[in-house]
Amino acid sequence: MKKFVNREAEIQFLETQFSKEGSSFVVIYGRRRVGKTALIKEFIKDKKAIYFLATEEIESQNINNFKILVAKFFNNSLLEKAQNIMWDEIFEFIANNVKNEKLVIVIDEFQYLCKVNPSFASILQKIWDEKLKGKNIFFIVCGSLVNMMEQHVLNYSSPLYGRRTGQIKLKPLKFKYLKEFFPQSTEDELIWLYAILGGVPRYLEVFNYKGDIYEAIRENMLNRQSFLYEEPLFLLEREIQDIGTYFSLIKSISLGNHKLQQIAQTLSVPQTRLTKYINTLIDLDILRRDTPVTEEYPEKSKKGLYFINDNFLNFWFKFVYPFKEQLELDNVEFVLENIKKRIITEHISFVYEDICKEYVWELSQKGELHLKISKIGKWWDKNNEIDIVGIDTTTGSLLYGECKYTNSKVDIDLFYSLKQKASKVNAKNKAEEYYIIFSKSGFTERFLSFAEEIENLILITFPERTIFNF
């Protein structure tokens, strides 16, 4: 069942654009399955709208399909019967027939039109400038192939550059919204589901979960007939050429190689050869480059590490892709046992850090911390690593945090270890320092008693969200 979850900010943005006098031109883009079409349909459900879904057919067929759609919308049989009509003639008809009520025009899968006719962006630019601009029209173009959308719509060199009045790059949902897809699941189960699927609505919709996570992995990810079994292959082959190199690169990162030098060594190629591939994957939101949060110029930092920017892809490349040969031979149990041995220490615990970081950000935004965090991330040097460091750039105050996804209660030694690592952090204008520790299984009585005497320490049992010493 399709669900429309969250997206309040995006809907509000579209409503604001819609309410403006005259014309508006908004671009909506993002990776496949992220919910772009659902967002648009939710927005136009109570509006006068023409929604056109482009296809990979030849251009004349797309023109004909659009013509019929417009003719039926305006109930005009002459337009419907018209032969050899062009894009500009259809849009001129629309412009001439727009009344007082604002009309929304949507072209979804816009990139297909650019694919079959590389000049389509120029054609649309002329149509916008000469026929639509200034009319009572809200024009939306939407696309999934991120690099093509940026090339044809958003880049400075694009004919459409400067025409848009706004854009939305739609991102996956955050952890806090998973409950709406799995209302019967416990908070801990939701952590696992988020670690495996991420926040892409389509994956959350198709994942059949009945309370046994390993059985669900078997059915939904290791089954060769399942939707998710080859989804990354489908996702990436639509965006990039030379898919083998990209797959090898992503697999290397999923297995713990985060430095460019390490990745190059595992692939036996010079580092310089990887730059093009890595930049492409960053542009597609598949990879991200992280630096210690205290770096003043992160783009110039030599401490950059590369991570997969999607929990589902990370899980798939870590636990499914390397064992495709076994799965093709129906040796599912072997693969499942490997997942059971490694998933907590190599996957869940890292996603748990990201979820805790998201929760810290929420607490700060609600004004429930002693500082107002404006930057948050990880910190590391050659010998130390801190899971969470939040910076109040106005006051110079810092928050240091550790996250422990274990079955044992956390004791006081973790606090001393965190303080020791925090002393190594070299931050600009360092002022007040605070500490926050997350634990899946809670804290020892000794630690809880100790924490009561420390004003700048917060302990949180998470995901239960039991907060001590607040």
Image (cartoon, rainbow, N blue to C red):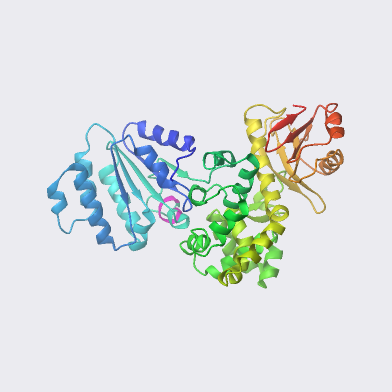
Above or below for 132 versus 346: above
Above or below for 158 versus 458: below
Q: Would you say residue 218 sits in the magenta stretch?
A: no
Q: Which residue appears at 49% of the width and 63% of the height?
A: 225
Please give the count of numbered marks on the rendered protein. 0
Q: Is residue 349 visible?
A: yes
Residue 311 relative to residue 80: left or right: right
Residue 245 x, y percent position in the rendering: 57, 69
Nearer to us in this view, 81 or 277 = 81
Residue 402 relative to residue 171: left or right: right
Q: Which residue appears at 49% of the width and 47% of the height?
A: 201
Dividing the image into 4 quarters, which one contains the C terminus? top right
Residue 292 x, y percent position in the rendering: 72, 47
Q: Is residue 295 visible?
A: no
Residue 238 x, y percent position in the rendering: 45, 62
Q: Which residue appears at 29% of the width and 63% of the height?
A: 58
Of helix, strand and loop, which mostly describes the magenta segment? helix
Which quarter of the picture shows residue 219? bottom right
Q: Which residues are magenta?
A: 150-154
Residue 116 x, y percent position in the rendering: 33, 63
Nearer to us in this view, 364 or 212 = 212
Which quarter of the picture shows residue 131? top left
Q: Would you say residue 153 sits in the magenta stretch?
A: yes
Q: Which residue appears at 57% of the width and 66% of the height?
A: 246
Residue 23 relative to residue 365: left or right: left
